Amino acid sequence: MRTDNTHHLLAATRQRSDKARQQAEEALKQLDQTTQPATVSELARTAGVSRSWLYTQPDLLERLQQRKRPGKAPATGSSVRTSEASMQRRLQLAHQRIQQLTDENRRLQDRLARAHGALRAARR
């Protein structure tokens, strides 16, 4: 029997997440010192983190939206706008994933029914 070493994986994941957060916060400070527009792409590039990770960090997105932009009023609200095409693509991918999971569920239910049948036959 193998030893459960998942605590090592969890610790490494936590360290990576903490490091990414620290890098993103430092990058936000750097961007505050410039007149560049504040975008998720720019923050990700400056911090050396992925945009997808940034989108899972609502507090960082809020801070990014609230930072002052030259000639513009600060953004209000915490929502991040996406394009119609992007939203359609995400919806399409979600539907595909649902279909995959439905098919897998159907296959597993069939296997379970066959296993129950085999057990019933073996008991006779």
Image (tube, rainbow, N blue to C red):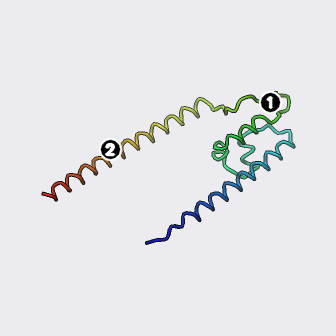
| Circle number at residue 61 | none
Label count reads 2
* Quadrant showing the C terminus: bottom left
Mark 1 and mark 2: Cα distance apart in space: 50 Å
Q: Is residue 8 left or right of residue 35?
A: left
Considering the numbered disc 1 on the image, is that residue within a helix, a strand or a loop?
loop
Are the two marked residues, 1 and 2, in contact with CB atoms closer than 8 angstroms? no
Position of residue 95 measured from the top left corner of the image (x, y, whole percent)? 45, 36
Q: Residues within 10 Å of mark 2 (few under 14, many from 20)?
A: few
Where's residue 49, x and y in %? 69, 51
Task: Give how far across and how far down residue 48 sits, in percent.
Answer: 72, 52
Mark 1 or mark 2, which has the lower sequence index? 1
Q: What residue lies at 59% left-to-right and 60% top-to-bottom?
A: 10
Check disc 1 and give the amino acid type: Pro
**For this view, does 16 lie left or right of residue 114?**
right
Pinpoint residue 94: horizontal percent, then vertical percent: 49, 38
Please report the residue visible at 23 percent of the width from the left and 51 percent of the height from the top.
114
Q: Which residue is mark 2?
A: 106
Identify whether 18 is placed above or below 66. Answer: below
Q: Residue at x 71, y 56 (%)?
A: 19
Q: Residue at x 70, y 53 (%)?
A: 20
Q: Specify few, some or many for label 1: CA neighbours under 10 Å numbering under 14, 14-19, or 20 or more.
A: few
- Label drawn at residue 74: 1
Amino acid identity at mark 2: Arg
- With respect to residue 20, does 98 lie above or below? above
